[in-house]
Amino acid sequence: MAAYARPVEKLITELSKLPSIGPRSAQRIAFHIIRGKTDDAFGLAEALREVKEKIKPCRRCFNLTEQDECGICRDPGRDASVICVVEDPYDIGPIERTAEYRGLYHVLGGALSPLDGVEPEDLRIAELVERVKNEGTKELVVATNPNTTGEATAMYISREVEDFPVRVTALASGLPVGGDLEYADEVTLGRAFAGRREI
């Protein structure tokens, strides 16, 4: 016999599917929602529904957007000759908060990891090469995570574009090896951008 009513058990089960949320955390969140205001719970449910119905990848850079192109790609004030390559859309936020970077982005959708079955064709590397070829890109800032898979991805990208007249740089030191961009503070990330280097 279940400890809680079926809807509560279902909520706990669904919450525990989220990354970094174990069964105990899921249970605490579920009871927080139950004890909270009805409007807050419905607001959360509406936000989840809306994001699944309206959000899609930008056709140019693969950032998340409601339109065909994201706000960054549509911004005429951005430097279209520079593309910052990131693994996931959530890596863009910390970079934007530094106010050090004014170019465009390209979201790969992950990093190369043959052991996990992630090969070049599983990422948006071919689309990146097409952008470099067709958009007059002068610099690629490869901002993959500073870990084994991120470094392997950066090296692969640099080889893929070596026949084009494009400068390939990586973020400078200051980011911890084995860390993720989403956890880096703005000062560290800003310094890393300011001191980026050739790959």
Image: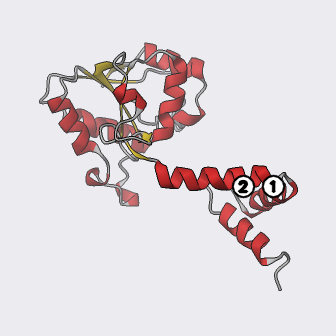
Q: Which residue is drawn at 51% across and 39% down?
A: 90
Q: Please tell me how crowded label 2 is: few (under 14), some (14-19), or many (20+) other residues with Cα within 10 Å.
A: few
Amino acid type assigned to the residue bearing label 1 in the image = Thr
Q: Is residue 165 left or right of residue 99?
A: left
Q: Do the residues labelled 2 and 1 touch (CB within 8 Å)?
A: yes
Say left or right for 21 vs 179.
right
Above or below, 83 against 55 in this view is: above
Q: How crowded is mark 1: few (under 14 residues within 10 Å), some or many (20 or more)?
A: few
Image side of residue 22 versus residue 149, left or right:
right
Task: Please provide percent x and percent y for residue 5.
Answer: 82, 76
Q: Which label sits on residue 42?
A: 2
Q: Which mark is residue 38?
A: 1
**Image location of residue 167, percent across then percent down:** 24, 21
Q: Element type at marker 2?
A: helix
Q: 32 or 108, which lies in front?
A: 32
Task: Specify the farthest residue to the left.
Answer: 163
The residue positioned 43% from the left and 14% from the top of the image is 195
Q: Residue 104 placed where, x, y %?
A: 35, 26
The Cα–Cα distance between marks 2 and 1, rounded to whole angstroms, is 6 Å
SS for tag 1? helix
In this view, the residue in front, 73 or 88, is: 73
Residue at (33% x, 36% y) in the render: 154
Q: Which amino acid does label 2 sit on?
A: Phe
- Inspect this view and state whether residue 141 appears: no
